[in-house]
Amino acid sequence: MTPLLSLVVLGFRNFDVTTRACLESLLPWLDDPEIEVLVIDNGSPDDSAQKTAAWCAEHPQARCLLSDRNRGYAGGMNWGAEQARGQWLLLVNNDTVFPARTLDALKQVVREVPPDVAMLGPVTNAAGNGQRLWKPGASHEDWLQIGAWLNQHPSHQLMPAYRCDFFCIAIRRDAWHELGGLDLEFGLGYYEDFDFSLRLRKAGYRQMITEDVFILHVGSATFQGNAAARALIKRNKKLLQSKHPDARFEHTRLGNLAVVQAYRVLRNRGSWTPELQARVALRIDALRHDAPRSLIKRWLWKRKIGDLLAVFSAAPLQGTADTQKHASS
């Protein structure tokens, strides 16, 4: 049986800090015949490879792949994808945690998605684009509860995305092979996901945000923001610009704004549900949180979103208030 989803979980260093929590959150799906899990140690310099192998030995449903060197993000994911069998690839950073029913929700989405949609980005608590939701003061435990609620109460909506963030990303395997995977020229990491998003668009495929799949993004421990990392970011940004001179480097707020504008269309059409109300509440919080720091720019931003917020500040449609409370509490 060909799996529906192939998860490629890429780890590097600090197994007990990051990878273990990610893998433990995947335990509910290890026996699912529609899902295969490939766990990669990407040439860790510490004892993470041994710990990865030990974890897989305890859970033989997962396949263990130990690289003899650090292949970088692109190289590691390409290596894992070569050995995957699923109709869809799910590239998973090890700094993620899967709340209850995450993969059940994703399976439902990929079954329903139009054939021209080749990439799906889940929503999360931390991303650099419109995939990020926001709730003031929310802890990781709060987000796990919010995420579980979202996964269990679908909206059946796909939202626009200029690019997708690859903390966790679902890609049709045939489209992945058509594009040749990630570009190895980006080395250890940064901007290879942006490049793939733009290449996918130019190949005629759509990429969308799925509002029905939430994954907690804890934050990467791979790069520490040192001088070498800053130099790599600068180098890879120039590489991306040379490959895609028309690339737009948008602030997170603009990606979220595009999604909220799509929600306004649904609201104005009367196509509104408690599930949509709960989601837009988290996005409205994000719009407010992401206001620019400059007083002038902040004022301009408030003017820009004022009419939009007014649409949702009215009393919720009947039946939405309780749902919104449960999703954001």
Image (spheres, rainbow, N blue to C red):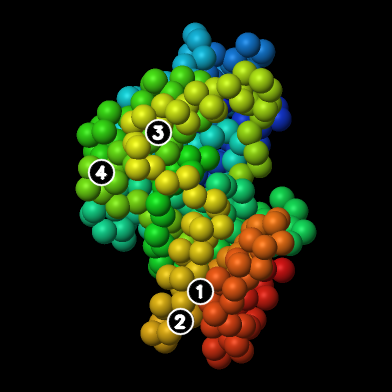
Q: Position of residue 309 (x, y in %)?
A: 58, 77
Label 2 or label 4, whichever comes before in sequence order: 4
Label 3 or label 4, whichever comes before in sequence order: 4
Residue hosting label 1? 276
Which of pointers 3 and 4 indicates the residue nearer the eye?
A: 3
Distance between mark 2 and mark 4 Cα atoms: 31 Å
Number of other residues with Cα within 10 Å of mark 1, as a class: few under 14, some 14 to 19, many 20 or more = many
Q: Amino acid at mark 2?
A: Arg
Q: Amino acid at mark 4?
A: Lys
The front one of 26 and 253 is 253
Residue hosting label 4? 202
The front one of 139 and 233 is 233
Q: Residue at x 39, y 85 (%)?
A: 269
Q: Amino acid at mark 3?
A: Gln
Residue hosting label 2? 267
Which of pointers 4 and 1 indicates the residue nearer the eye?
A: 4
Distance between mark 2 and mark 3 Cα atoms: 37 Å
Q: Which mark is residue 47?
A: none
Number of other residues with Cα within 10 Å of mark 2, as a class: few under 14, some 14 to 19, many 20 or more = some
